């Protein structure tokens, strides 16, 4: 059974509350799909405005009245209130005023709500979304709305009525909101039926004008163009499952290219916040940031595999070993030396180093860099790379174990072994990368020479070319 929609008309004076009415409409509609809010600014060109207003008031279950701050002619507001009460005797009338303003005579016999955050949340937004009797419908407009959502919406309405509507927010990017109440999100199959909202549309990330769809529809849309990148959907699924399992979500790294008019732009999803009810996550907010560089740019096959691991080795050297070992724990001429560091400073050093290493490890695992690079080497160098990777595994495990024990001396010693390994690995990788670059450049030069020869032959074959 389709749940009933609710219509609301906002009665206000355009001269004082035009922007506020538009902002309140956006706030109210963003919290549910079943609420239609009408304001007179939407009257189509050429329509009879008086008839349009009367018609929409007559078909509304609610009338929201925004009282102006200054003394003014309230005749038209009185007319709209009278019209609503006569044609909708069972309708809900909500009147808002600034907390410090007096109640005008036209509504002295009616309940008026002070437009403060707490009053709006308790007496207007809470009943509106949670209590079906408030507007005489069978089901709440949004049974999953949280107290935090109500207070945030109330604060935004309060700011609008206080005249802070000149502050306009411009969002550089797009967002998706995933509703997961009563859904098992620990598996991709369970997540398939989750409802996804696109508050600002998803024209950039998916070239789609839909505002709501299922998670399965999102998967299908993303898979329509494999070349743009689709792992970001899987990574969002993993993050949702991790949060639902009460684990800290991973750092999202996947990128993909936009579609349609912004096909050249690159985006990365980011979990912005999670709404929970009684400790259970029910809504996940993802924001899509534009980035300048894709997650990983590489050549094909062997040259790409070597480049990837050289990239990881470079990160380990300059993000971990150099700053944490060479500059901090071993430098005797710049205080504090490792012998002068306090226990708290040592613990912080270990924590930061291990955290950085794990982030780099996640990137290597994400692209299977270590296993794939072995095939890029020949003969003795291949065996040497295998040995280096085994040594790297032993050292990494020893670093993690020393960190757990907070054994600073052992930890420093393992970092020293990692530095020695890193130097040997980078030299081997750099030499192989140079060989592969030379081979690739040789093939590129042959290709360019062939193209020049073809162009010369074509030009020579044209009529009159020998004249």
Image (cartoon, rainbow, N blue to C red):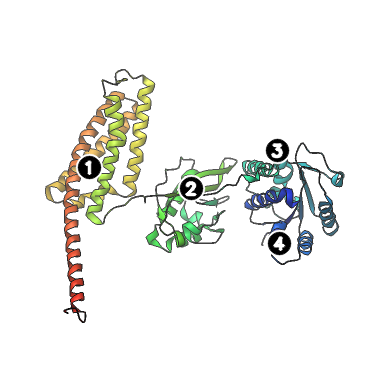
Between label 4 and label 2, give the one nearer the viewer.
4
Q: What SS does tag 3 mark? A: helix
Circle nearer the N terminus (2, 3): 3
x, y percentage for residue 126?
Answer: 70, 45
Task: Compute the Cα span from label 1 to label 4.
Answer: 69 Å
Measure how far apart labels 4 and 2 are at the Cα level: 42 Å
Give the alpha-carbon distance from disc 4 to disc 3, as whole Å: 33 Å
Q: Name the one closer to the observer, 338 or 133.
A: 338
**Residue 316 in the image, given as x and y percentages of width and height:** 29, 38
Number of other residues with Cα within 10 Å of mark 4, as a class: few under 14, some 14 to 19, many 20 or more: some
In the structure shown, which secondary structural element does the residue marked by tag 2 occupy?
helix
Q: Is mark 1 on a helix, strand or loop?
A: helix
| Residue beneath the point at 84% across and 43% down | 104
As drawn, is 188 to the left or to the right of 363? right
> Alpha-carbon neighbours of circle 2 within 10 Å: few (<14), some, or many (≥20)?
many
Residue 55 position by quadrant = bottom right
Residue most extreme to the top: 340
Q: Residue 240 carries which label?
A: 2
The relative height of residue 437 versus residue 44 in the rendered view (above or below) is above
Residue that badge 1 annotates: 389
Disc 4: which residue: 43
The first of marks 1 and 3 along the sequence is 3
């Amino acid at each position: 059974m389709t749940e009933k929609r609710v219509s609301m008309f906002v009665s206000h004076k355009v001269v004082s509350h035009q922007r506020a009415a538009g902002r309140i409409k956006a706030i109210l509609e963003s919290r549910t799909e079943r609420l239609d809010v009408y304001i007179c600014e939407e009257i189509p060109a050429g329509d009879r405005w008086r008839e349009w207003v009367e018609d929409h008031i007559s078909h509304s279950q609610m009338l929201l009245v925004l009282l102006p701050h200054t003394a003014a002619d309230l005749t038209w507001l009185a007319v709209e209130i009278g019209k609503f009460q006569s044609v909708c005797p069972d309708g809900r009338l909500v009147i808002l005023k600034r907390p410090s303003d007096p109640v005008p005579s036209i509504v002295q016999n009616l309940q008026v709500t002070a437009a403060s955050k707490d009053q709006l949340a308790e007496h207007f937004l809470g009943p509106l979304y949670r209590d079906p009797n408030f507007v005489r419908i069978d089901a709440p407009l949004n049974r999953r709305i949280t107290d935090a959502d109500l207070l945030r919406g109330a604060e935004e309405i309060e700011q609008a009525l206080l005249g802070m509507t000149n502050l306009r927010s411009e969002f550089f990017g797009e967002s998706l909101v995933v509703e997961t109440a009563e859904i098992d999100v620990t598996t991709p199959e369970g997540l398939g039926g989750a409802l996804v909202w696109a508050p600002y549309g998803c024209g950039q990330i998916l070239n789609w004008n839909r505002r709501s769809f299922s998670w399965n529809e999102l998967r299908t849309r993303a898979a329509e163009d494999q070349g743009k990148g689709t792992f970001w959907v899987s990574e969002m699924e993993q993050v949702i499952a991790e949060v639902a399992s009460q684990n800290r979500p991973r750092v999202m790294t996947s990128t993909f290219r936009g579609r349609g008019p912004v096909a050249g732009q690159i985006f990365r999803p980011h979990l912005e916040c999670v709404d929970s009810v009684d400790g259970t996550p029910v809504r996940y907010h993802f924001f899509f940031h534009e980035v300048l560089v894709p997650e990983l740019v590489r050549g094909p096959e062997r040259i790409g595999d070597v480049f990837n691991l050289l990239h990881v080795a470079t990160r380990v050297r300059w993000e971990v070993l150099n700053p944490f070992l060479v500059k901090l724990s071993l430098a005797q001429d710049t205080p504090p030396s490792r012998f002068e560091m306090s226990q708290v400073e040592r613990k912080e050093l270990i924590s930061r180093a291990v955290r950085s290493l794990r982030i780099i490890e996640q990137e290597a695992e994400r692209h299977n860099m270590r296993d794939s690079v072995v095939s890029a080497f020949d003969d003795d160098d291949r065996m040497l790379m295998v040995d280096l990777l085994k040594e790297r595994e032993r050292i990494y495990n020893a670093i993690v174990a020393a960190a757990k024990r907070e054994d600073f001396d052992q930890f420093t010693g393992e970092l020293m072994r990692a530095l020695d390994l890193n130097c040997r690995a980078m030299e081997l990788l750099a030499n192989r990368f140079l060989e592969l670059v030379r081979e690739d450049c040789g093939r590129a030069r042959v290709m360019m020479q062939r193209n020049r020869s073809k162009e010369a032959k074509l030009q020579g074959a044209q009529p009159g070319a020998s004249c």
